[in-house]
Structures are given as C-alpha cells and as structure tokens.
Image: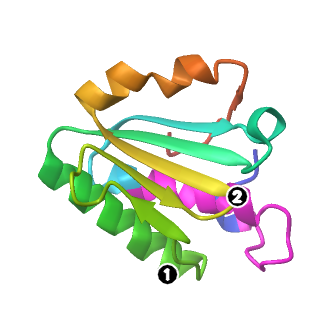
Amino acid sequence: MADVDDIDVTMSHPDVSLRTAIVAAAAAEDKLATDLLVLRVGPIVGVCEYFVLATAANDRQVRAVVDEIEAQVADQIGERPISVEGADARRWVLLDYGDVVVHVFLSEEREYYRLERLYSDAEVVDADVV
C-alpha cells in the first residue's frame, strides 16, 4: 500500500477515502485507542467505502479519541463529519464522513456488536498505523 503521505488528498482523487480512513486510524492510535481496524466495506455495504474501528478504555478516552479524529481529519483532509452519533453517551460513537464511517467503542460495546464478525468478508486494509 502507498505511504500515507504519498496519497493525493484532492477531493476528486479516488484515494481520498482511503487517506481519510488512515488519518482517522492514526488519530485514534495517537490517543491510545486499541484494536484498530480499517475495513474496506464498499463492495459489501454499498453506502460507504471504509469502516474504521477503534476501542477506548473508558468514556473519557472515547471523547478524546473522537476529538482527535475530528481534528486530524479536518487538518489533513479538510473534512468535517456529516454527522456524529452517540457522542453524549460515549459508549459507541459513530463519525460519518460519507465514504468513511468511524466507530469508536468502549470495549464492552465492541465485544457485544462485533462488527468485525458481521463484516468478516470485508478486506482488511493493511495500514502501517493499524
């Protein structure tokens, strides 16, 4: 896979979705999220191209991870989420960037919903940050 810095981020470039997913995963990693996973779900779900999954230890870390993802994607890609769901409860926060959907879970929520299992046919993106 191309180095993150080698991917053109102009909005017309098809790799902008991949870059967004990688930047989101790197931001989650910066805030010590665990079990990071980037899945190419486009061929399966059809409404987005990538899922980014991350686990946080507690609700404060969920907030910190979400804040860092929003800041880094805005800074590096120039995009804000279309919508944010679950931010008040901070158990499972979903950031919708259109072609990329980021899921930040508490470990109990991640284990319960097991999106990796639901989308086990999805390609796992081999990103250096994951």
Nearer to the camera, 6 or 50: 50
Q: Amino acid at mark 1?
A: Asp
First in sequence, mark 1 or 2: give its number.
1
Q: Residue at x 58, y 78 (%)?
A: 79
Residue range in magenta is 6-27
Residue 26 lies, in percent from the top left, at 46, 54
The numbered dot on residue 75 is 1
Tags 1 and 2 in contact by the CB under 8 Å rule?
Answer: no
Q: Amino acid at mark 2?
A: Asp
Residue 38 figure quarter: top right
Q: Residue at x 50, y 79 (%)?
A: 74
Residue hosting label 2: 99
Q: Residue at x 78, y 72 (%)?
A: 8
The numbered dot on residue 84 is none
35 lies above or below 59: above
C-alpha span from label 1 to label 2: 18 Å
Residue 70 lies, in percent from the top left, at 42, 70
Residue 9 lies, in percent from the top left, at 73, 74
Q: Residue at x 75, y 50 (%)?
A: 47
Local packing at callout 2 (Cα closer than 10 Å; few below 14, some 14-19, many 20+) is some
